C-alpha cells in the first residue's frame, strides 16, 4: 500500500513563500483505513507532495479532514504548516481518540535557515541578487510602478553589507530586502526615514497602488490615503465572507462616510485575490499585513472597541490572532515598544468588548504556546474561555464538560508559568476532577486527558513543595501512561517519560536517590528512543538529564555525572522561536 498526500490548500511546499518559511512543520502519518477519499472533497493534488497551510488557524477543520481520511483505504501523509506549535495541535477539540493520538504523535520540526550562516557569505549575496532579478521581471506588471529598466538595475544592485545578520536566516526577510532595495533605487523611491523597516517602505509604495485604484471609474472613492490605508488594515484584521459583512465591519471606521461603505467594500474586493469562501483578500505576505494593521492602530486610525463590536465571531478571532502575531513580529525585530503598544491597545479594548464564545475558543487555540510575549493575553483569553465553559456546562454538562476540563487544564499551566501557584493548583485540580468523572464513563477517550492533567498537577505540587501529594498524583499518572504506552508507545512513551521525570523529584527530595535515579534513567531512555522520529522531545530530555547528573554526583559516581553533563552541553536548547 503506497503513501499518498492530500492538499487542503493550493500550496506547493517546495515554493519559498511566507507561510512555508515562517512555519513549524508537523508530519501526520495516517495508517490504512476507510474508503477512498474523493478528490473533490480534499482539493487538488500535485504529484506526491501535499500540505495543509495555515493549520494553526483552522484546528477544527483539520480534525474533520483527518477524521475523514481516517476512513480511507489509503495510507496518507499530511504536511501541516503553521507559525508555531500550540493548542491547535495538542487540544482534543472533540476529536476522536484515533485523531487525537495521531496529532499528539506528530513530530514538530522547526525550519532551519535556508542558507545557514556557516556557509559562505557569497551564497546569501547570490540569493539576494537572484531574488532582485526575479522581482525585476514582475515589476513591469504592476500598474502603479513606473516604467524602468528594472532588470538592468537588479543586476547592478549591491547586496546589503549585513547579510550575515541573523534576521536574514529568514528567507522572506532577504526577499523583502531585495524588493525594497530595488524600488528605492528606482525612479520613484519612497520618502522614508533612514533605517525604516522594509515593511514600512513597501507600504509607502503600496499606498500609491491604493490611491490609483480607488480613483478608477468603477469606484471614485475620493478618500484620503489614511482612510484607504485604514480600510486595507480592516481587511487584514477581520476579512469578510460576503459583501454585506465587509460593508458592516467598515462601518466602524469613523472617517468613512456611510454612503461610501459598499463601494469601499467592492474596492477592497478588487485589490487582492480572495481565498476560498472569502469576499476580499488581504495584503501579502502576512508579515506586511500584520505590520500595517498594527501601525494603523498605533496611529489611532481604527477604534478597536468599535471594530470588535461590529465584527462577527470569526472576524473577532482573526483580529486577535493577527494582532498577536504582529506583536511577536515587532518584538522579534527589536521593536519592543511597538510590540507593547499593540498588546496594550488590544488589552484595553478587551476591557469593554464582548467576545463571542466561538471567537474566544478560536483565538485561544490559535495562539502559540508557550510564548513569553503573549503570556498575559493567553492567560486572559483562557480565563474567559473557562468562565464561558463553566456557564454552558451548568446547563449542558454532557456537551461542555470536556471543553471545560481542557480549558481548566490549559489555564492551570498558564497560571503556573505566571508564578500563580495557588490559582494554578485550583484550576488543574478542577480539571482532574472532571476528567476523572469522564474517564470513568469513557476511559478510551478520556484516560489520556486524565493522565496528562494528573501529571500537570504533580508538577505544580512539586513546585509548591507538597511532596506527598506530588507522589500520589504523579504515581497515578505513571500508572495510566504505562497502560497507554503498552498499546501505543509512539504516542504515549514521551508522556510517560515526562511523568517519570516529575515522580523522580519527590523521591530525590525524600532521600530515595537510587529510586529517583532509576526513574530518570527510564525517562531519558524513553525520550532518546524518540528523538530520531520526534525532534520536539529533545528539549524535554534536558530536565531529567540534569537531575540524573545531580543524582549520580550525590551517589559518588562523578565520571558518569560528567558524561551526562557533557551530553547536555553538546546538545544545547535553542531559543524560543516565537517568544
Image (spheres, grey):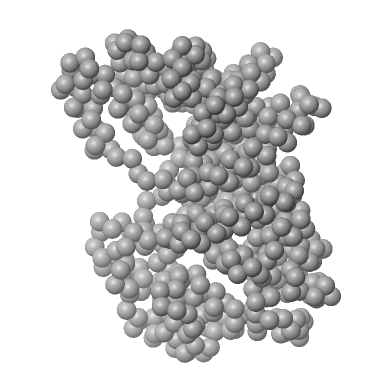
208 on left or right of 568 = right
At x 35% / y 29%, what residue is drawn? 543
| Spot occupied by residue 492 in the image (x, y as percentages of width and height) | 48, 23
Q: Quadrant of residue 252?
A: bottom right
Q: In the depicted view, which residue is nearer to us: 303 or 157?
A: 303
Which residue ends up furthest to the left in the rendered image?
559
Tally of numbered tags = 0
**Is residue 116 among what the camera can see?**
yes
| Spot occupied by residue 185 in the image (x, y as percentages of width and height) | 41, 84
Tell me: residue 216, above or below residue 20: below
152 on left or right of 452 = left
Q: Quadrant of residue 515?
A: top left
521 on left or right of 38 = left
Which residue ends up furthest to the right in the rendered image?
259
| Spot occupied by residue 541 in the image (x, y as percentages of width and height) | 35, 29
At x 67% / y 75%, what residue is drawn? 228
Tell me: residue 137, above or below residue 289: below
**Is residue 264 among what the camera can see?**
no
At x 19% / y 22%, what residue is drawn? 560
Q: In the depicted view, which residue is nearer to us: 4 or 497?
A: 497
At x 68% / y 66%, what residue is drawn? 302
Amino acid at each position: 500500500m503506497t503513501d499518498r498526500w492530500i492538499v487542503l490548500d493550493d500550496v506547493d511546499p517546495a515554493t519559498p513563500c511566507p507561510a512555508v518559511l515562517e512555519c513549524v512543520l508537523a508530519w501526520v502519518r495516517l495508517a490504512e483505513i476507510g474508503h477512498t477519499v474523493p478528490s473533490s472533497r480534499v482539493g487538488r493534488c500535485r504529484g506526491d507532495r501535499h500540505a495543509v497551510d495555515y493549520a494553526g488557524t483552522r484546528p477544527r477543520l483539520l480534525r474533520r479532514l483527518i477524521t475523514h481520511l481516517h476512513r480511507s483505504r489509503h495510507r496518507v501523509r499530511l504536511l501541516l504548516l503553521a507559525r508555531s506549535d500550540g493548542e491547535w495541535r495538542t487540544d482534543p477539540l472533540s476529536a476522536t481518540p484515533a485523531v487525537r493520538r495521531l496529532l499528539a504523535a506528530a513530530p514538530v520540526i522547526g525550519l532551519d535557515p535556508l542558507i545557514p550562516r556557516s556557509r559562505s557569505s557569497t551564497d546569501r549575496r547570490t540569493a539576494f541578487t537572484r531574488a532582485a532579478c526575479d522581482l525585476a521581471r514582475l515589476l513591469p506588471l504592476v500598474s502603479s510602478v513606473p516604467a524602468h529598466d528594472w532588470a538592468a538595475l537588479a543586476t547592478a544592485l549591491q547586496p546589503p553589507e549585513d547579510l550575515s545578520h541573523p534576521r536574514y536566516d529568514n528567507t522572506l526577510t532577504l526577499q523583502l530586502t531585495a524588493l525594497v532595495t530595488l524600488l528605492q533605487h528606482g525612479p520613484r523611491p519612497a520618502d522614508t526615514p533612514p533605517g525604516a523597516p522594509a515593511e514600512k517602505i513597501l507600504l509607502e509604495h503600496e499606498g500609491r497602488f491604493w490611491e490609483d485604484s480607488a480613483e478608477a471609474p468603477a469606484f471614485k472613492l475620493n478618500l484620503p490615503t489614511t482612510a484607504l490605508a485604514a480600510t486595507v488594515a480592516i481587511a487584514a484584521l477581520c476579512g469578510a465572507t460576503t459583501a454585506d459583512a465587509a460593508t458592516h465591519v467598515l462601518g466602524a471606521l469613523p472617517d468613512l462616510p456611510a454612503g461610501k461603505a459598499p463601494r469601499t467594500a467592492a474596492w477592497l474586493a478588487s485589490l487582492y485575490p480572495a481565498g476560498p469562501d472569502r469576499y476580499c483578500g488581504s495584503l501579502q505576505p502576512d508579515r506586511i499585513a500584520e505590520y500595517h494593521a498594527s501601525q494603523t492602530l498605533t496611529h489611532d486610525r481604527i477604534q478597536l472597541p468599535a471594530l470588535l463590536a461590529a465584527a462577527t465571531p470569526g472576524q473577532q478571532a482573526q483580529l486577535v490572532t493577527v494582532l498577536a502575531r504582529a506583536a511577536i513580529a515587532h518584538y522579534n525585530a527589536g521593536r519592543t515598544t511597538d510590540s507593547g503598544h499593540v498588546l496594550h491597545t488590544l488589552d484595553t479594548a478587551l476591557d469593554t468588548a464582548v467576545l463571542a464564545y466561538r471567537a474566544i475558543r478560536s483565538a485561544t487555540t490559535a495562539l502559540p504556546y508557550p510564548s513569553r510575549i503573549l503570556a498575559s493575553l493567553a492567560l486572559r483569553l483562557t480565563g474567559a474561555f473557562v468562565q464561558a465553559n463553566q456557564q454552558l456546562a451548568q446547563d449542558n454538562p454532557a456537551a461542555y464538560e470536556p471543553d471545560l476540563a481542557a480549558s481548566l487544564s490549559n489555564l492551570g499551566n498558564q497560571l503556573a508559568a505566571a508564578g500563580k501557584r495557588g490559582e494554578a493548583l485550583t484550576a488543574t485540580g478542577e480539571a482532574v476532577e472532571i476528567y476523572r468523572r469522564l474517564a470513568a464513563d469513557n476511559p478510551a477517550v478520556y484516560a489520556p486527558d486524565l493522565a496528562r492533567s494528573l501529571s500537570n498537577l504533580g508538577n505544580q505540587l512539586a513546585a509548591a513543595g507538597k511532596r506527598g501529594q506530588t507522589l500520589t498524583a504523579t504515581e497515578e499518572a505513571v500508572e495510566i501512561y504505562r497502560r497507554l504506552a503498552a498499546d501505543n508507545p509512539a504516542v504515549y512513551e514521551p508522556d510517560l517519560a515526562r511523568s517519570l521525570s516529575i515522580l523522580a523529584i519527590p523521591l530525590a527530595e525524600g532521600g530515595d536517590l537510587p529510586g529517583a535515579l532509576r526513574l530518570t534513567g527510564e525517562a531519558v531512555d524513553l525520550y532518546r528512543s524518540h528523538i530520531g522520529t520526534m525532534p520536539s522531545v529533545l528539549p524535554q530530555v534536558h530536565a531529567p538529564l540534569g537531575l540524573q547528573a545531580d543524582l549520580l554526583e550525590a551517589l559518588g559516581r562523578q565520571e558518569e555525572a560528567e558524561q551526562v553533563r557533557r551530553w547536555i552541553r553538546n546538545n544545547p536548547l535553542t531559543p524560543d522561536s516565537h517568544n
